[in-house]
Amino acid sequence: MPSQLYIRIKNLNETKILAQIISKFISIPFFICLSGDIGSGKTTFARFLINQFSKKKIKVLSPTFPIVQIYDLKKVNIWHYDLYRIETKNEFFNLDFDTAINNCVIVEWPDIFVEYFPKDRIEISFQDEKNNIRHVRIKLFGTSKTIKEKLWKKLNQK
């Protein structure tokens, strides 16, 4: 059973702070799944997280149409997938996923391919509420569960 954390995000700055906090607790390679409705903050969170690993601010684009964007940073390669338009296993495995898994992976719209993901992963779900407030559920799987206490303490300080 995964460990879970729940928080509320009220604005873009809090989304950025969440990405900064999580970046401090993940080790490379890492695997993060992002789920939520269209416009709920998945790509925005990914943008902030990827920029945490870059030494300079980089333009992080939504991978909706190219399906994958690869960011070759000095110390890490980050594969940013958007599986929204992928429907079959063959399409999925043609995306060099076997190579990406050894690096750092962020997957938007992971739902139908979760069975192929590593047991050590973080799943973050964004759900809109009124007035631009978002409920965020963070699930920690495998060895990622060991960061729960530290992460929870840090998130409660923000």
Image (cartoon, grey):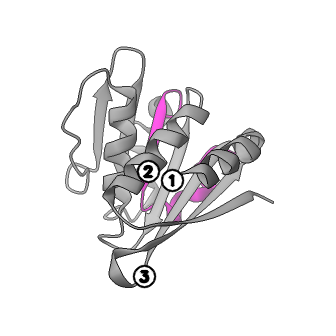
Q: Which portion, as a residue range, is magenta?
A: 101-119
Q: In the rendered image, which residue does mark 2 sit on? A: 107
Between residue 68 and residue 126, name the one nearer to us: 126
Question: Based on the displayed image, in which of its 4 quarters is residue 27 positioned?
Answer: top right
* Residue furthest out toward the bottom: 130
Question: Based on the displayed image, in which of its 4 quarters is residue 151 positioned?
Answer: top right
Residue 69 at x, y = what percent? 27, 40
Residue 108 at x, y = what percent? 40, 56
Which mark is in front, 1 or 3? 3
Residue drawn at the location 40% of the way across and 41% of the way down: 49
Give the mark nearest the N terminus, 2 or 1: 1
State yes or no: discs 2 and 1 in contact (Cβ < 8 Å).
Answer: yes
| SS type, badge 1 | strand
Give the mark nearest the N terminus, 1 or 3: 1
Q: In the rendered image, which residue does mark 3 sit on? A: 129
* Residue furthest out toward the right: 1
Question: Based on the displayed image, in which of its 4 quarters is residue 42 positioned?
Answer: bottom left
